[in-house]
Image: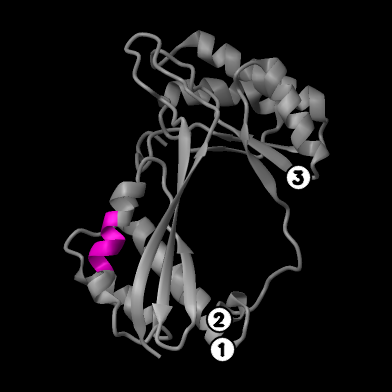
């Protein structure tokens, strides 16, 4: 079996958000979410699917996947470890969100294809499954107002999800915007009051606040017991963390 073609597919979904910096007018949240799916086709009629989505990175990831097509065509897709390691070793620049996302899309598509070829679930290729079911949370919790945050959490819980994830501190206009902290704290408190203690609240600051701002916010919402605060400082900034 040989790889004969690769294709990309993009789908854009509105996020319902349009937050801008109050002073500069600069957009600080995406108004739509673009999903990028990657397909590997073979001469055996089997295909594998992967995903290469990334916030504001899809054009670059898609271009990278198209550039790497020559490294895939004609190869045996069942040699998935050899293929991904070969691509990584060829790159003069290692790591980074674009290359990492592109490699992940290829790796997922190759594993999907191998599972189909051998008629086994992908987890069998990775050492077997660890559990029969998993808890699932819903993304996109609103922080527009405490009222909307509470209503959104209540609705998400009613749908059967185990938790809801939202993005605090995105209304800030400067690094230590006290009003943004107060607003986000009020939203988290409203969510916890609305859904009780048997429902998870997950927070993602998108790596943009200063360490001081994240520390103050985390201290203020600790009694609400969020499951985690993701990317509280700039991504890759070990010293700040």
Report the mark closest to the observer, 2 or 3: 2
Going from N to C along the chain, the mark reached first, 2 or 3, is: 2
**Marks 2 and 3 in Cβ contact (< 8 Å):** no
Residue topped by disc 2: 115
Going from N to C along the chain, the mark reached first, 3 or 1, is: 1
Give the percent coordinates (x, y) of residue 48: 48, 74
Q: Which residue: 71% across, 28% down?
A: 152
Residue topped by disc 1: 118
User: Image height check: is 50 above or below 226?
Assistant: below
Secondary structure state at the residue bearing disc 3:
loop
Give the percent coordinates (x, y) of residue 205: 50, 31
Q: Which residue: 79% across, 37% down?
A: 157
Give the CA distance from mark 2 to mark 1: 5 Å
Quarter placement of the C terminus: top left
User: Image height check: is 111 above or below 227?
Assistant: below
Q: Main secondary structure of the magenta part?
A: helix
Report the mark closest to the observer, 3 or 1: 1
Give the percent coordinates (x, y) of residue 45: 47, 84
Q: Residues within 10 Å of mark 1 (few under 14, many from 20)?
A: few
The span picked out in magenta is: 63-68
**Marks 2 and 1 in Cβ contact (< 8 Å):** yes
User: Image height check: is 161 above or below 102?
Assistant: above
Residue 64, magenta (yes or no): yes
Residue 154, numbered label: none
**Marks 3 and 1 in Cβ contact (< 8 Å):** no
Residue 162, numbered label: 3
Quarter placement of the N terminus: bottom left
Secondary structure state at the residue bearing disc 1:
helix
Q: Which residue: 80% across, 24% down?
A: 194
């Amino acid at each position: 079996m040989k790889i004969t073609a690769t294709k990309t597919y993009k789908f854009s979904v509105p996020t319902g958000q349009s937050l801008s910096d109050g002073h500069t007018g600069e957009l600080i949240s995406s108004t739509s979410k673009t999903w990028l799916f990657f397909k590997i086709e073979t001469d055996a009629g089997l295909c594998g699917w992967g995903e290469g989505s990334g916030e504001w990175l899809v054009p670059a990831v898609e271009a990278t996947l198209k550039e790497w097509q020559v490294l895939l065509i004609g190869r045996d897709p069942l040699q998935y470890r050899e293929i991904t390691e070969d691509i990584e070793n060829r790159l003069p620049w290692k790591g980074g969100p674009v290359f990492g996302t592109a490699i992940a899309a290829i790796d997922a598509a190759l594993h999907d294809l191998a599972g189909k070829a051998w008629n086994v679930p992908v987890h069998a290729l990775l050492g077997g499954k660890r559990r029969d079911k998993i808890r699932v949370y819903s993304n996109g919790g609103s922080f527009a107002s405490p009222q909307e945050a509470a209503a959104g959490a209540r609705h998400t819980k009613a749908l059967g999800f185990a938790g809801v994830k939202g993005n605090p501190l995105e209304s800030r206009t400067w690094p230590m915007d006290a009003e943004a902290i107060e607003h986000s704290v009020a939203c988290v408190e409203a969510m916890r009051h609305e859904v009780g203690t048997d429902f998870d609240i997950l927070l993602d600051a998108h790596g943009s606040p200063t360490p001081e701002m994240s520390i103050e916010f985390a201290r203020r919402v600790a009694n609400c017991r969020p499951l985690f605060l993701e990317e509280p400082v700039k991504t890759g900034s070990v010293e700040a963390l």
